[in-house]
Amino acid sequence: MFEGVPPLGKKQANLLTAILRGVPVLGPGKEPHLLTDTDVRGVLATLPPCADAQETGEVNRLRPHLLNAVIGAEARRSGYLQALPRHGLAPLLRTVAEAVHAPLVLRIVYGASTNVPLRALSYVLPALRMASRLTGAGHRAPHLQIVLAGSLGCWVNALPKPTVTAETNLLARCLDRLLSHLTPGHFGVYGTLPSPDVVTALDDLVRTLPPARRADVLERLGGKGGATEDEQTLLYAAAHVLVHDRAAVPLTLRQGTPVPENAPVIDVGSLQERHFHDVRHLFATGQTGNTGPGALVLSRHSVPPYTMARGGDIGLREFLDDTNTPGRPVASAVRHDLRLLWTALPPEELRRVVDVPRDDPHPVVDLRHATARRPVGVPQEALR
């Protein structure tokens, strides 16, 4: 039987190891594990073979450039990226290899919020910078998929639907304006559509979780995600599986353009997403033919950008209305995220770009007349 061509030669293995050596990997604690040569080569040995010698040559030629653009030293230094989750190396290597032949999707998922902070707009910027590096490395422009899971999170965590809906609509409108300004034509803003089938699938996932892994999920996610009861925590964890790994939650395109079909996906998420990536691994454990959670690169957002920080934050609405109190104390994580936001657009320009009449019915952007793309990541004066 034809078994394909081994994917790696000595030179390729050395290149990939050099890129990945020293990349931080975050587990449950705060201290990272830095990838060693042994770590990397152990995972490289598990990569599937390519179909033929021509494909092997193309993958080996392009994969190091793409991997470096995604998680290399410069990406971590200037891209507001920090680490990989504990089980994140193997899926990232697989996805980067797939991206050599297919359009790549960079996905950012927002949860439910009753008061969207201003810094939520910064959540897309690490993916935008990654996209810029990928095109600079010779890859076709990636497609940004923004998933607003407010309606799903609202149901799971029993939040007030009218408030969550209003905040999700505001965020969708502002992201549409911001992304149309920064990267016209290469993004789609989606909403989730909870249905009886989704509710059933969530219940089934939770019910079929073995007791030991059920306990592991609860231990790992205790106090995270806004859940207040064990059953909510388990449903919230299962929702991550359905959205990220099984494409089992129907999505509706709200703005922008649809993602390419069957495209490889890299999630770009906050540091807290490492806990949910681990839990997704627990749900996949023991399932035949399941390779586990997909690729995730962790940004430096240490507090989920779609929830207000407990140490002080600025709401998106009050920023647009210019009602926030000058000099009000904010958490250090907020300052960092806002500093990132100002590197894309200073405050007054950002307000001009994203602020629209409140009765705007979320019009579809005519990309033929979209504003030319602005570079992202040009250093400006830091937030004081």
Image (tube, grey):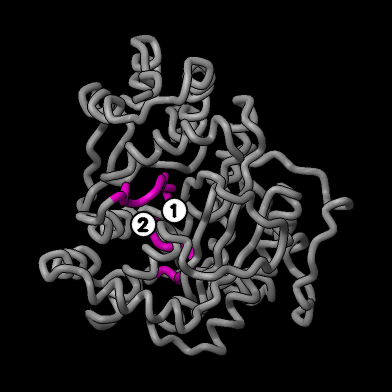
Quadrant of the rendered structure where residue 361 is? bottom right
Above or below residue 322? Residue 122 is above
Q: Nearer the viewer, residue 342 or 288?
A: 288
The answer to whether mark 2 and mark 1 are in CB contact below 8 A is yes
Which amino acid, mark 1?
Gly
Predominant SS along the magenta part: loop
Q: From the viewer's side, name the closer residue of 242 and 67.
A: 242
Q: Identify which residue is drawn at 41% across, 45% down.
A: 295
What residue is pinned by disc 1? 269
Magenta range:
289-309
Q: Amino acid at mark 2?
A: Glu
Q: What is the crowding at mark 1: few (fewer than 14 residues within 10 Å), some, or many (at least 20)?
A: many
Residue 36 image point, x, y percent: 23, 26
Residue at point 62%, 45% (across, down): 343
Residue 27 placement (x, y as % from top left): 23, 48
Mark 2–mark 1 Cα distance, whole angstroms, equals 6 Å
| Residue at figure coordinates x 48%, y 43% from the top left | 80
Q: Is residue 158 above or below residue 102?
A: below
Q: Choose between 127 and 379: the one closer to the eye.
A: 127
The residue drawn where x is 53% and y is 53% is: 107
The residue singled out by tag 2 in the image is 273
Above or below — where is 126 with respect to 213?
above
Residue 384 visible in the snapshot:
no
Q: Is residue 195 left or right of residue 146?
A: left
| SS assignment at label 2 | helix
Q: Farthest residue in the top direction?
A: 11
Quarter-of-image position of residue 204: bottom left
Q: Residues within 10 Å of mark 2 (few under 14, many from 20)?
A: many
Q: Is residue 55 left or right of residue 49?
A: right
Say if the magenta span includes residue 291: yes
